Amino acid sequence: MPTPPTSPVASELRAAVTPGAVIFGRSRALRPTGKVLPEHARTHNRALVLQTLYSAGAQSRADVARETGLTRVTISDLVADLIAEGLVVELGQREDARPGKPATLIDVAREAFHIIGIDLSEHEVFRGAVVGLDGQIIDRDEVCRDGATGESAVLLVEALVERLLARTSTPVLGIGIGSPGVVDPHGVVRSAPNLGWSDVALQGRLAARFALPVHVANDANVAVLAEHGSSDHDDLLLVKVGHGVGAGLIIGGRPVVGGGFAAGEIGHVVVGTDGGPRCACGRDGCLEAWVAAPRLTAQLAELGGDGDTGAAASARDDILREAGRRLGIVLAPVVGALNLSEVVLSGPAQLLDGVFHEAAVDTLRKRTMTEFNRDLRLRMSEQAEDIVLRGAAVMVLSGQLGVT
């Protein structure tokens, strides 16, 4: 059974995370964030070969040499090692009308490993999936939270991982987890008020328990990297609305996490000076208190009756419109400061698509300069509810193989 490989080539990306769509292999790669040191050259070249094959599909060794700029001798040496490790396979000879011996095609061994992806961002459940290297969901499971926080919530995560591991007989490349809150590069959840976590060493604990590589990052940072693969822009802000509210940011093709690992923590920005609902963090009027899915769902449930007709429908629209307006207020200075052209919403479509979305767009346009926001697009995510699961899988691909 192959041992999950480890690649230090993405050491800086681990502090951020990394992209994927339904088919990861056709997604766009993130830009590297650091220089390649001489002692890391072989690791870098190895990742370059894997990235080329992963993105382009089956190629000959000569094709890979041309694409990467590496010599044929170097490519031959690297490919031999990758084949020995079970990461690359030969597919047979290319059908070619050109004279000479047909080239042998090689590709990433896409069936060699599975990945466990975990999404902790939902209010009522923790969700997980067994994911293939091409991004396909092979199996899935979930555990009901029942309001669990603290140690009880950690035990639920462990139970979910254990159940998913039992569902695959294929070697597992690693475990990727998208968690709410502030997460440092070592996978320590420094603060996640909704889960009652403070300085929880989730990565270390799970790695010790399951003897597998584990990568943990903020759920919105994971989600934006999944979305990046299907976006036409290298500057992208994704707002993740679930149990809480957070944002993931990519600028110039590079993830932004901040010096304190809290870039995108817009959920606990107080919106306005008129007070507002009490937030889980203890303050009044945080964006999360206005916009988080459980808060909105509870407010709409209090209306009673038929929410689609008459006064109830009007009251429902008022609640969603005000929530969208509050989000627009928080996003306007971010969009203005960074000159963003695309903002993506990820969360329950029944809440965010429609009146909420319209109010957020209207507020953004009113609060930013017209000449700079003329091309601004605010849209719903194309990744649906699996965005964090797929992003978590890509995080493992980056951390273990250097593939982004």
Image: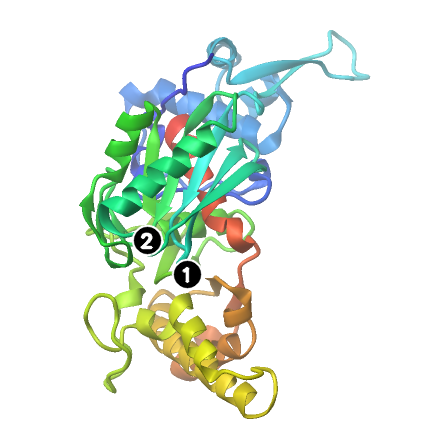
Q: Amino acid at mark 2?
A: Pro
Look at the image and name its color scheme: rainbow
State the image coordinates of residue 36 (x, y, percent, origin top left). Answer: 32, 29
- The residue under the point 26% across, 39% down is 202
* Helix, strand or loop at mark 2: loop
Kindly identify which residue carries mark 2.
180
Horizontally, residue 314 falls left or right of residue 326, namely right
268 or 163: which is nearer to us? 163
Q: Quadrant of residue 163?
A: top left
335 or 187: which is nearer to us? 187
Kindly identify which residue carries mark 1.
242
- The residue under the point 52% across, 26% down is 168
378 or 4: which is nearer to us? 4
Disc 1 to disc 2: CB gap under 8 Å: yes
Q: Earlier in the sequence, mark 1 or mark 2?
A: 2
Q: Is residue 72 above or below residue 242?
A: above
State the image coordinates of residue 271 (x, y, percent, origin top left). Answer: 29, 78
Q: Amino acid at mark 1?
A: Gly
State the image coordinates of residue 349 (x, y, percent, origin top left). Answer: 54, 66
State the image coordinates of residue 327 (x, y, percent, origin top left). Answer: 39, 74
Q: Is residue 10 above or below residue 320?
A: above
